[in-house]
Image: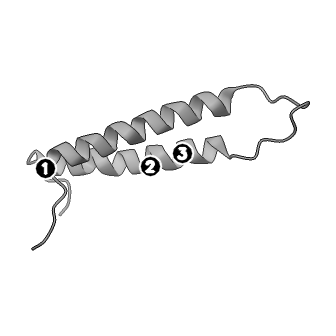
Amino acid sequence: MRSQMTLPITLMIAAALAALAAFAGWRGARPPNPFRGPRMIPWRAIMVTAAAFLLVMVVHLLNLMGVKTGR
């Protein structure tokens, strides 16, 4: 039996990725604090990666709704 990524699962993943991108964007935009040392988490890279995967999820949502996005 083959498992499929249904509409509710895709929506949950897309919402989680959108929340992660927004949170990482907020954290990456905060001014650095030199007293606490360098940032150890690359928030901007996390934001861009989450946004790229969110774009993939949006295309998948469109495909689930019947819009043909490929050849």
Q: What residue type is disc 1 on? A: Leu
Per the image, label 2 sits on a secondary structure element best described as helix
First in sequence: mark 1 or mark 2? 2
- Determine whether, in the image, residue 19 is placed left or right of residue 47: left
Q: Residues within 10 Å of mark 1 (few under 14, many from 20)?
A: some
Residue under the image location 16 percent in, 61 percent down: 4
- Measured in 3D between alpha carbons, the distance from the residue under mark 3 to the one under mark 1, in whole angstroms, is 24 Å
- Determine whether, in the image, residue 50 is placed left or right of residue 39: left
Q: Give the residue number, with chain letter if any, for mark 1.
A: 64
Q: What residue type is disc 2 on? A: Ala
Is residue 55 or residue 40 the one in the foreground?
Answer: 40
Residue under the image location 50 percent in, 31 percent down: 22
Q: Relative to 56, is 37 above or below?
A: above
- Determine whether, in the image, residue 11 is placed left or right of residue 37: left
Residue 48 sits in which quadrant? top right
The tag on residue 15 is none
Residue 11: x and y in percent read: 24, 41
Q: Residues within 10 Å of mark 3 (few under 14, many from 20)?
A: some
Q: Furthest residue to the bottom?
A: 1
Per the image, label 1 sits on a secondary structure element best described as helix
- Measured in 3D between alpha carbons, the distance from the residue under mark 2 to the one under mark 3, in whole angstroms, is 6 Å
C-beta proximity under 8 Å, tags 2 and 3 = yes
Q: Give the residue number, with chain letter if any, for mark 2.
A: 52
First in sequence: mark 3 or mark 1? 3
Per the image, label 3 sits on a secondary structure element best described as helix
- Measured in 3D between alpha carbons, the distance from the residue under mark 1 to the one under mark 2, in whole angstroms, is 19 Å
Q: Give the residue number, with chain letter if any, for mark 3.
A: 48
Residue under the image location 33 percent in, 51 percent down: 56
Where, quadrant-wise, is the N terminus in this rendering? Answer: bottom left
- Determine whether, in the image, residue 20 is placed left or right of residue 24: left
